[in-house]
Image (cartoon, helix red, strand yellow):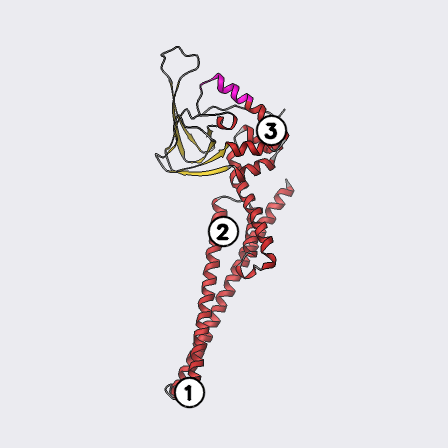
Amino acid sequence: STAGRARRLLARVQIAGQAVQDFFSSSSVILCLVVLQVWLKTVMLTHAISCLRCGCGRARNSGQVDRSTSLHWTLANLVVQLQGLRRERTARHKVVRNFLGRHRISSPLSVRVWNHVDRCQPERVRDANASALRKLSAELIVDLLEEMRVPTFSAHPFFINLRTKHPHLVRELCHESLQPMLRSPDNIIFCAGEVSSRMYVIINGHVQYCASVQQRDAPPGSAPAHVKRTLHGGQWLSEAALWTGWVHRGELRAITDCLLVGLDASSFARIISSHKSAHAFAAAYARKFVEGLNRGLQTDLVEAGSVSLQ
């Protein structure tokens, strides 16, 4: 919409303004350092000339020499401190810039982050505003976690519907229930027979699931069905842990470096149960899921398919 485009344009202008402000701030610090260095060299040159004229070893000038040396050290320390502050500020801004770019944080939220970083400069923090800054930091962290983790659920039918009707619950799930996991090639994520307490979502990379499962109603002595599947970013498994007691039926192993998130089943149940209509929808979805689980081959790959809030 036109309003949405206007907001995005305004956010980009604010980011550009912040970048210009950072540039001039850095330039002013550099100019200050240059002035101080010139001043220091001038004072040292004046002192050297005085020493040559009067003789540094004379007792009557010893006090003047001490004062001059003290001034030199004071100015030198000031220059070093200013240089350290500039390096610290530059490093902090680089970390923030890399974080926002790597996680593709939206322009409006990026503007809020930069404004908060500016307000949290050590020289601006006072006892009077420390509490407000802490509260704002917590709110920003929740918003960042939501924006980074909501795409995890972008393809799952239950969470698509949940976000439509109860976005605050999805926000709470992102903050409290998702646990990121980094795995290297050949790392085993879970094994057959282990009790499952979470649903797994692959963010990036590739994993391989292997299972040998006895088919339902198969004749005695028949060979189990072998399941082998490679999964990638945007796919999930072990969803059954959210809806019923579940034991892993197979093994999940990382093929490449990969990032997964685990949705903790107990935390999920607590958050969903806090809202009556969300709990009713989850219960209906769970019944449909378990019915499908009981009809087919029981693996960690079972999905409930499309769902509707109607």
Q: Quadrant of residue 37?
A: bottom left
Q: Which residue is mark 3?
A: 279
Q: Amino acid at mark 2?
A: Val
As helix, strand or loop, the secondary structure at mark 2 comes to helix
Question: Residue 19: image x %, image y %?
Answer: 53, 55
Real-space Cα distance between discs 3 and 1? Answer: 87 Å
Select label 2 or label 3 by which is in front.
Answer: 3
Query: Horizontal placement of 217 versus 271: left or right?
Result: left
Real-space CA distance between mark 2 and mark 1, rounded to the nearest whole angstrom: 53 Å
Q: Which residue is mark 1?
A: 61
Q: Residue at x 49, y 24 (%)?
A: 303
Position of 244 compared to 186: left or right? right
Number of numbered discs on residues:
3
Quadrant where the C terminus sits is top right
Check disc 2 and report the residue beneath it.
96
Q: Which mark is residue 275?
A: none
Q: Is residue 122 magenta?
A: no
- Residue 294: percent from the left, percent from the top? 49, 18
Q: Residue at x 46, y 25 (%)?
A: 246
- Badge 3 element: helix
Q: Of callouts 2 and 3, which one flags the residue occurring earlier in the amino acid sequence?
A: 2
Magenta residue span:
287-297
> Label 3 crowding class (10 Å Cα cut-off): few <14, some 14-19, many 20+?
some
What is the three-letter code of the residue carrying label 1?
A: Asn
188 above or below 285?
A: below
For image coordinates 55% across by 48% down, the residue present is: 110
